[in-house]
Image: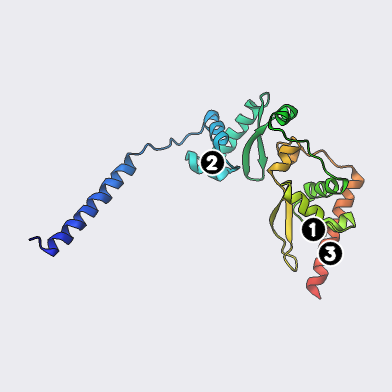
Amino acid sequence: MTDAGDTLEGDAADALDGEAALETSISAEPRVPATLTEAQLEALLFVAERPLSRAEIARLAGVDGETVDERLGDLEVALASRGIRIVLAGDRVELATAPEAGALVARYVGADAVRLSPASLETLSIIAYRQPITRAGIERIRGVDSDYTVRTLIHRRLIVEQGRSETPGRPILYGTGFEFLERFGLTSLDDLPPLELDTAARLVDGVDAIGADADTASTN
């Protein structure tokens, strides 16, 4: 007959042996080398199911942020004449098809060209150039209610929520997402064409008016 104390001691020993075996197994797993080549970065972005941040890439490769930026720059140059491009949105990165291949790719996937109403195009332009911006800011610039148009652009994933403003009521801030860059063949917001002076002044004046209203409300 086996003593209960002996059984417990045996179980504890087995558990310790199991933990030791697990630690040995983990330590035996191959470590990711602390390097990042163009090929590795391209492969990682290719298999990623979502945009990756620079911090994620650095952590996965075991390198610092400066190395990630250098490899991104190298890869961007290498892909310049090919059918794939690097798309940057803030700190996030992904691969997308080249703009000049858009028509051919669209025929293959059965996608239609972007068709936006004048109201949607105007609203999207305001958001693209003045982001992050609230719906009140959009409406001040346009002069009309923009709730339906904003919801339509969100549904099409051309704009996304980017947090909340610090103004009273903490309204939602809107900005463009990766879908916007991909649909319009941009690799980053820096590729947006420059605005005419009167248009730029109109955007600035409209948003500044929102800020003045918020300051007035906070002092009342």
Mark sitting on residue 57: 2
Eyeballing the image, is 38 above or below 219?
A: above
* Callout 3 secondary element: helix
Q: Give the x, y percent position of residue 29.
A: 35, 39
Mark 1–mark 3 distance (CA, rounded to whole Å): 16 Å
Q: Residue at x 89, y 51 (%)?
A: 202
Which one is nearer the viewer's eye here, 212 or 52? Answer: 52
Residue wearing tag 3: 212
Counting other residues with Cα less than 10 Å from the Cα at mark 3, is it few (<14), some (14-19), or many (20 or more)? few
Q: Give the x, y percent position of residue 220.
A: 81, 76
Mark 2–mark 1 distance (CA, rounded to whole Å): 34 Å
Q: Residue at x 68, y 42 (%)?
A: 178
Which is more foreground, mark 2 or mark 1? Answer: 1
Left/right placement of residue 138 relative to residue 25 reads right
Q: Earlier in the sequence, mark 2 or mark 1?
A: 2
Q: Quadrant of the N terminus?
A: bottom left
Left/right placement of residue 37 relative to residue 14 reads right
Q: Earlier in the sequence, mark 1 or mark 3?
A: 1
* Callout 1 secondary element: helix
Q: Which amino acid does the dot numbered 2 rest on?
A: Ile
Counting other residues with Cα less than 10 Å from the Cα at mark 1, is it few (<14), some (14-19), or many (20 or more)? some
Q: Give the x, y percent position of residue 188.
A: 71, 39
* Callout 2 secondary element: helix
Q: Residue at x 30, y 47 (%)?
A: 23
Q: Residue at x 87, y 47 (%)?
A: 200
Eyeballing the image, is 48 above or below 169?
A: above
Q: Which amino acid does the dot numbered 1 rest on?
A: Arg
